[in-house]
Image (tube, rainbow, N blue to C red):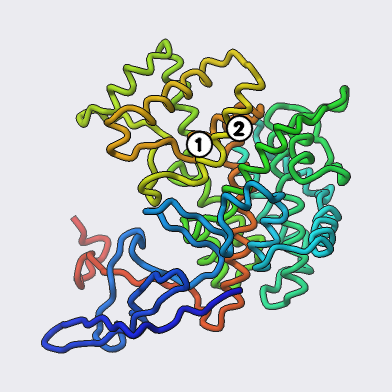
């Protein structure tokens, strides 16, 4: 159940120009505390400055709890370890969006509602003819999702619960189809239509890899690995893309437009593109005769610009709980496939160094979720350009949950950050002919 942040008995005092201002302190359900500065500008004329919002709480939320120091990640109060061990991805979608794990009846109805919407409007298929063959799948994904607002004009009102509900079903159902079509376009193969007899992950893998001329056999280990990856990526508090979805949605933009904006934010190499960068780094090492020791030495050299991708985390200070979960799936897949892929060998060597070398251990440069997910995607036969698309599929329920939570909040306001202006002061205008 959602809880409202309570006002703490603590008070923060700000002294400025000989005056003192008492600021309320609010406390969350996990004893996190924040200074409420909503009245700061009105009472003092001051604003706060926080580049990148790294110390700024933009909202209260009951969806996701993250403790980077202790390596804790929970969705709606449930540990990510328990959820990954026991749940199907669509159960996680229900949990994030509606706040509780579904009963058997609720889950059956939810799954059936999504299955009824997996196909794309045939006119939407024509969009792919207009994209260059080498178009990045994230560009195609964001474009087609945004265009859904033109095809489904019956569900654009963010204040109508029934319209929001049908938009949720359409997005969850169609995003794997849109993603798979983007891949098929890039390799010149015919589109594979969804099969509603299959599970969510089975359906996506079939649309990605099947061809009309032969039977496609679904590997249950592939399905399990993909299910895990989607679950561990489903939400991660107020990250860049989630904050983007909230900001765009705060203007009452429809859900399709808000999610398209989140996809664009996720595309950035500093966010969702990190697993692509990780595999690109492995490729670089392979092309240099697989000399792992050379690149480890470069990473340790403070005067060298080279950085090992996929190690350490901005939020998790000791370990990434998501990486711990998918490492087992990664090891299981590599052992089963027995593929003579030099990238897998390089990844395993780097993992061993990061876990045992004192330099990396002291600096907490452990393999993170991007390191293992990139390796798993490759093992599943997912091309590198599609890695971030898979991330978007996983993050979709989190985006929807935050968009929905924001609209349900009685304190909802359009997002409008302030700034500290540093440009020229008032200047005299000079007509064009007099400018030298």
Query: Quick one: quadrant of the C terminus?
Result: bottom left
Task: State the mark number for residue 349.
Answer: none
Mark 1, other Cα within 10 Å: few <14 / some 14–19 / many ≥20: many
Disc 1, SS: helix
Q: Nearer the viewer, residue 104 or 406?
A: 104
Q: Find residue 320 and report its horizontal and vertical position in percent.
A: 45, 45
Disc 2, SS: helix
Q: Is residue 403 left or right of residue 16?
A: right
Mark 2, other Cα within 10 Å: few <14 / some 14–19 / many ≥20: many
Query: Quick one: quadrant of the N terminus?
Result: bottom right
Q: Earlier in the sequence, mark 2 or mark 1?
A: 1
Q: Residue at 81% x, 49% y: name it.
A: 120
Q: Find residue 364 and report its horizontal and vertical position in percent.
A: 33, 40
Q: Is residue 202 left or right of residue 49?
A: right
Q: Residue at 43% x, 27% y: name it.
A: 351
Residue under numbered circle 2: 377
Alpha carbon separation for disc pair 2 and 1: 9 Å
Tag count in the figure?
Answer: 2
Q: Find residue 75 and report its horizontal and vertical position in percent.
A: 57, 60
Residue under numbered circle 1: 275
Picture quadrant where residue 94 is located = bottom right
Picture quadrant where residue 168 is located = bottom right
Q: Residue at 33% x, 17% y: name it.
A: 293
Q: Nearer the viewer, residue 100 or 432?
A: 100
Q: Nearer the viewer, residue 385 or 165?
A: 165
Question: Are the residues flagged by discs 2 and 1 in contact, CB closer than 8 Å?
Answer: yes
Q: Is residue 158 left or right of residue 7?
A: right
């Amino acid at each position: 159940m959602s809880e409202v942040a309570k006002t703490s008995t603590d008070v923060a005092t700000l002294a400025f120009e000989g005056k003192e201002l008492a600021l309320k302190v609010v406390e969350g359900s996990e004893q996190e505390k924040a200074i409420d500065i909503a009245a700061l500008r009105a009472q003092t004329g001051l604003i706060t400055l926080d580049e990148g919002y790294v110390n700024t709480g933009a909202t209260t939320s009951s969806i996701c709890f993250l403790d980077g120091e202790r390596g804790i990640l929970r969705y709606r109060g449930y540990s990510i370890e328990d959820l990954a061990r026991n749940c199907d991805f669509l159960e996680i979608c229900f949990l994030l969006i509606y706040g509780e794990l579904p009963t058997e009846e609720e889950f059956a109805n939810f799954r059936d509602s999504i299955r009824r919407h997996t196909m794309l409007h045939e006119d939407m298929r024509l969009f792919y003819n207009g994209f260059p063959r080498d178009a990045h799948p994230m560009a195609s994904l964001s474009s087609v999702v945004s265009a859904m607002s033109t095809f489904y004009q019956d569900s654009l009102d963010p204040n109508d619960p029934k319209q929001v509900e049908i938009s949720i079903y359409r997005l969850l159902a169609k995003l794997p189809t849109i993603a798979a079509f983007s891949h098929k376009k890039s390799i010149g193969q015919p589109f594979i239509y969804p099969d509603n007899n299959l599970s969510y992950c089975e359906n996506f893998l079939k649309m990605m890899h099947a061809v009309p001329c032969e039977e496609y056999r679904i590997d249950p280990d592939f399905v399990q690995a993909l299910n895990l990856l989607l679950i561990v990526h489903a939400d991660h508090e107020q990250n860049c893309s989630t904050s983007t979805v909230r900001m765009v949605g705060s203007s009452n933009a429809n859900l399709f437009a808000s999610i398209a904006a989140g996809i664009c934010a996720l595309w950035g190499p500093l966010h969702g593109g990190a697993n692509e960068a990780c595999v690109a780094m492995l490729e670089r090492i392979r092309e240099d005769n697989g000399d792992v020791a050379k690149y480890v030495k470069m990473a340790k050299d403070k005067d060298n610009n080279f950085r090992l991708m996929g190690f350490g985390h901005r939020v998790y200070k000791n370990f990434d709980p998501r990486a711990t979960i998918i490492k087992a799936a990664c090891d299981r897949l590599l052992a089963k496939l027995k593929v003579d892929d030099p990238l897998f060998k390089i990844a395993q060597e780097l993992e061993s160094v990061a876990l045992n070398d004192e330099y990396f251990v002291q600096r907490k440069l452990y393999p993170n979720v991007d390191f293992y997910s990139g390796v798993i995607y490759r093992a599943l036969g997912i091309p590198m350009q599609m890695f971030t698309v898979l991330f978007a599929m996983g993050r979709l329920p989190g985006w929807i949950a935050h968009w929905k939570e924001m609209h349900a909040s009685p304190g909802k306001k359009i997002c409008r950050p302030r700034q500290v202006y540093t440009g020229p002061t008032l200047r005299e205008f000079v007509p064009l002919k007099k400018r030298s």
